[in-house]
Image: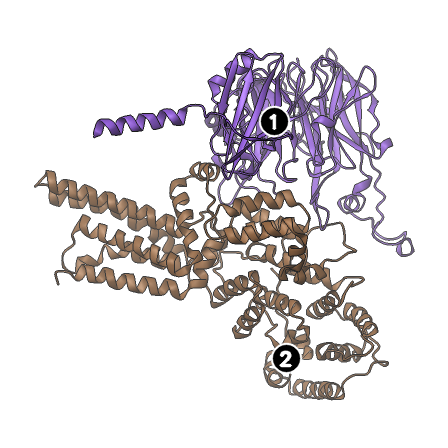
Chain colours: A purple, B brown
Amino acid sequence: MKKSLSIIALAALLAACGHPSVPTSYSSDNKVPVIYPDYTDVVVPSNIAPLNFAVMEQGTEAVARFTFAGGEYTYGDGKKILIDEDEWKEMLAASKGKDIKVDVFANNNGKWTAYKSFNITVADEDIDQYISYRLIQPSYVAYEDLSIQQRDITTFEESTIYSNLSVSNEEEGQCINCHSYKNYKTDNMLFHMRQSFGGTMIVDNGNVKKVDLKTDSTISAGVYPAWHPTLNLIAFSTDKTGQSFHTKDIAKIEVQDTQSDLILYDVDKDEVSYISREENELEIFPTWSPDGKTLYYGSAYFVYTGRDHDKPDSLQSDTAAPIAMETEMIQRYKECRYNLYKKSFDPKTRTFGERELVYDAVANEKSATLPRISPDGRYIAFAEGNWGCFHVWHPEADIQILDLKTGNKVTTSPMNSKRSESYPVWSSNGRWIIFESRRDDGNYTRPYIAYFDKKGKVHKAFAVPQKDPSFYTFFLRSFNRPEFMVESVKISPKEFTSVAKTDARKVTFKEDAKK
Amino acid sequence: MKHSQYYSALVFAIIAYALLVMHSEYLYALQDNSIFIGGHTFMQELLNRNQGLWIWVGSYLTQFFYYPWLGALMLTMVWVATHLSLIVAFRPKGYWHIIPLLPVAFQLYAVMTFGYYIYYSKCPGYAFAMAVCILVMSIVAMMIRLAIDRFTKIKAKFTNIVLALCCIIYIVANPVVKLYSWTYPSKNFFAELKMYHAMDECRWDDVINENIKAKEPTNFMVMMKNVALIHTNKFDDMLKTNNCGTIYDAPDSLQVRTSRIGAPMLYYQFGQFNFAYRWAIENSVEYGMSIRHMKILIRSAMYNQELDLAQKYINLLKSTKFHRDWAIQKEREIHSSTLFYQSEECGNVVPLIVDDDVELDNDNSNCLDWIIRYFSSIEKAKNEKQQNVALCFSLVAKDGYRFATHFIDYVKTHPQGPIPHLYQEAAIMFGSMPDEALDISGFDFDNIIAERYNNFVREFYALKEQKLSDEEMASKLKPLYGETYWWYYYFYSDLVLY
């Protein structure tokens, strides 16, 4: 009796681990199946993790057949298609520069339907092995547990770089943000901590230190960072940021800077100096060219009048006290639009040249932010919306790419959606762009990747794969600031925590570095 | 005497069950402020937290408070099992058999006195989480005792001491700590729970009656009652239904704010879907997702036409045990605009959506103040319901100028009358003030109301000449004029909005 039970159990185990067979009789539907995440006709890196998906067609059961140069595999687990990792690697290796054909069959009340095949094209190029992001609920003012995570996107391994729960308590919370790396490597990286144990965590050649970047001469501590690719310098914006809430617009929030400048932080000397603080300009989001000789950034021309713009002209008075900058920015938020500029940088003298216009978004009544230069220096990717700087909350915002050589825009519609796209980042080989998108539901930001081929063509974007295809459906946090890394962060969360609990080292302000 | 310890367990079970079931609305609120979502993602989220396993189990069991009798039965059974395990583990003699009763009695006390902390707890399903955790420890103690009994004959005394110490630390200490930090909630707390539940189900008469029953309702209760009056078109009853709210009655250490305990629902009822969504999210971020917030997120997303977002939350709610039907109904409404627009909720809420809306605003965490301010300053009401809300909230805010503007509009749009008594009372009063906000010369008021106002003024000044304090005057005039706007205007000064 025991023996026969063992045999049954073993058979059941083998059946569970095996490949389902495709149905022999079915009707055909000449449309591509609806699957989630949408991996139909996408181009993927040759080292990406398995593209597990769920079949969203009617029915209770689905089978997918993957046909590739080396053969075929079938998968099906209810309506989920869960691909074996080793077999997926085999498929990718055999399909470099080729297609994997996918046939999906769905069973609805005992009747199978075969859908139109789709392809997954495997690019010749790999993608950087790691990405990092902040996990945050799409909240407004409140925050609780935040963490900066790193994910090996060639597998499903995820780990925590730093979690604010290691120092937060019931009374005092800690906000963490703006993780950033030098040249895709993690021996030089940073992130900010605000409120409890506030300061900026700098990893300098593998050593962690905590600095306070606020000086009496600057608006705030450093905010949006950009590591110089070769020198131990970091450009930051300094910003006075506020939030207000839409009563009706589904954009829901406007995050506005009422003041902002750019500063340069010398990591070795713990000194900051101004890069740009032009009158009536709100400078933001610095980023370096790969050769480190040019600094790109966004800037909005905005003149405060002090007038209450909610009052009709007949009620205006010359003797009335000027209204607060914050109030005026709220009243005129649609007028705040950013262009992209650049300044030359001399690494020897560490001085900046005059400002030059790179992209005139304002002329088209648009606002361009979050610029990033491709590793070959030819393209600039950025987010563009109708106004403001925080496009993650702007449904109309899209990723745009400008060819700096020709001055023409690249067609980016394959990577965009009707909902917000923001924060584009190039992979170290320039063939992949990761960005934030709210295309799934409008509110929760997911990391998407698009292929940018050698001819400068953008391909359809796909969601970073997850082991469970329903993960994004049930996960109530946003993926914020996706960044590529070629290696994992070596500092442990514990080490970060112990430094986080120390006092921040005050930086000094150096006036004469400004040109 | 031999079985007396089991009798005590039985007596405890009866008392505990009765106490729990008597507070069925509270039990319902416990599950409403918690959530359990099936699947790996939710489990992983909780398991990553400190004590995550217990929270996960607790959240699962808390769902059963949807039927308070069932949840109460389960919780009582867990406690009885704990008690019996401890009896087996320690085998107390004589009166000492009362000792194993203490941990469960403490738990009962803790659960029954959680009060406003149900909104601020960061441990969803805490009642069951605590109970199951202690039960497991008790069972471990029992197993150890049974093992010791079986395999050793000696050291019983020493073992008992060690076991007793361990259990005191793990079992008694925790509830005792909580006992010190918790105090009894107010009656208004329970009334608020009932009113919220009734409002969620559009049982408007229940909302109104609960407020009338309250001796001194909170301002949150008064606002819920006014929502019920607004949706049942009984504006004229505003001051006849206990409209003088007080501040919440909660432990001093707890700063109860409406933004936490009811803002998402209130904003939703007033057609302010972005603000409803915002506070449901803010509260979920800080104190954990709950059924009630999930429902508001779904409703707000639907009215905002963010259907994919609504579907996301519906998918989550569909995976719960007892709110699946509600979610499926909403899913039907997503796919059928006819169903959606024919729903009672829609009929209540849509007329309150203001067209000429301001674009950016901030309520500074004071929901009641924002709603009153916002609606009393509507420039152009688009329908009668908005007009009435504007008038009523101008009166609540004692803003004669805004009332005057809305009143003139009202009279123009209702040339045939009749003008509600409440508005007549206010118009007569504001019109007779020295710095009159309203010229009432052209209006035709009810003689009885005008006469009554004259009497009120006469009696008011007569009492004033007697040098009575405001409180004494309020008390003397209340029997005759307590439901009039004049009494409200002169004597109610406790509109503390929080």
Q: Amino acid at mark 2?
A: Glu
Residue B420 lies in quadrant:
bottom right
Disc 1: which residue? A39
Identify the residue shown where x is 21% and y is 30%: A1
Disc 2: which residue? B483
Q: Is residue A11 left or right of residue A372?
A: left
Give whichever of B257, B266 is nearer the camera: B266
Q: Where's the C terminus of chain B, which quadrant?
A: bottom right
Res B293 seen here: no
Residue B188, placed above or below residue A465: below
Name the front one of labels 2 and 1.
1
Q: Specify few, some or many for label 2: CA neighbours under 10 Å numbering under 14, 14-19, or 20 or more.
A: some
Q: Amino acid at mark 1?
A: Tyr
Q: Where's the N terminus of chain B, which quadrant?
A: bottom left
Q: Position of residue B412 (x, y in %)?
A: 84, 73
Give whichever of A280, A73 is nearer the camera: A73
Outermost residue on the left side: it is B153
Identify the residue shown where x is 16% and y is 43%: B146
Identify the residue shown where x is 33% and y is 26%: A11
Residue B321, placed above or below residue B227: above
Outermost residue on the right side: it is A314
Chain holding disc 2:
B
Residue B157, placed above or below residue B106: above
The alpha-carbon separation of the residues under discs 2 and 1 comes to 66 Å
